[in-house]
Amino acid sequence: MIQIYRQRMGGFWYAAAMKDDKVLATSFASTEETVLRHMLDGLPFNVPFQVEDKRSQLAEKLLTTLKCIMAGEDVSLDFELEMSHLPKYAQRVLGFLVKVPVGYVTTYGALAKAAGGGARAVGNVMASNPFAPLVPCHRVVRSDFDIGGYGGGYGEGRKVKRAILEREDRGYNEPTEMKVNGSVLSVFPVGFVRKD
DNA sequence: TGCAAACCATAAC
DNA sequence: GTTATGGTTTGCA
């Protein structure tokens, strides 16, 4: 049985799907209906689930973490993510993405260069990221530092993406290269992202 | 700038 | 198998 938790904090609804101590999906949205629907889309298959009204300690911690990420805070991600049902390539890309630190962004192309595959394929993985905003797909922008898409495509979600990034700005100035899984991943200061 | 073509994993047929 | 679809990128006018 999969447990689903949801909570409203600071103007957003947050939701998490958990099985035992593992996280299957997370989501956020402006309404309860949307956050639940969005998160159910991210679940692996049609398995029985139950919406819980009381939160386990771990669920409480997880939902709070989601809120803190939205607030641009630096949090530790010591949660166990269940992604074995995702395509292998998607797992790989997400594995690189979690290494991008607060205050930096990477690009679809840079992520592709590190993880393999192509930029558009990376975009596809971002669009179907079941772990937003825990796995920080909001930190992936276009190679020309246009903000890129968010929330499944080009829509209002872009505003949210920009807002999160503004709060994550740590004032770094220099691009840097990170060693991840034996590959090199280029990351860039949030300040590089184009304003409009 | 703007547009066309290349790019590449997935899902749907 | 094959095709259609993207949160992209690059080159060239």
Image (cartoon, coloured by chain):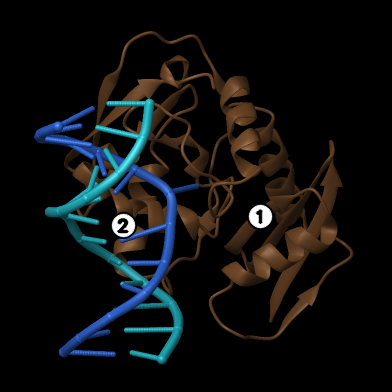
Chain colours: A brown, B cyan, C blue
The residue pinned by badge 2 equals A121
In terms of depth relative to the viewer, which is nearer, B6 or A132? B6
> Is there any visible trace of residue A62 in the rendered image?
yes
Residue type at tag 2: Ala
Q: How many marks?
A: 2
Residue found 31% across the figure and 53% down from its top: A120
- Residue at position x 70%, y 54% in the image: A58
Could you tell which of marks 2 and 1 lies nearer the N-terminus?
Answer: 1
**Subunit of mark 2?**
A
Q: Which quadrant holds the C terminus of chain A?
A: top right
Residue A65 x, y percent position in the rendering: 67, 41
| Res. A181 visible in picture | no
Above or below A72: residue A54: below
Q: Chain of mark 1?
A: A
In the picture, measured across the screen, residue A100 lies left or right of residue A48, that is left
Q: Residue furthest right?
A: A53
Residue occupied by mark 1: A27
Q: Position of residue A195 (x, y in %)?
A: 53, 19
Q: Amino acid at mark 1?
A: Ser
On the rendered image, what quadrant is the N terminus of chain A found in?
A: bottom right
Give x and y (percent) for residue A124.
40, 58
Image side of residue A11 versus residue A122, left or right? right
| Discs 2/1, front | 2
**Label 2 to label 1: alpha-carbon separation:** 22 Å
The residue carrying pointer 2 sits among few (fewer than 14), some (14 to 19) or many (20 or more) residues within 10 Å by Cα, namely some
Rendering quarter of residue A64: top right
Residue A174, position in %: x, y?
Answer: 32, 11
Q: Secondary structure at mark 1?
A: strand
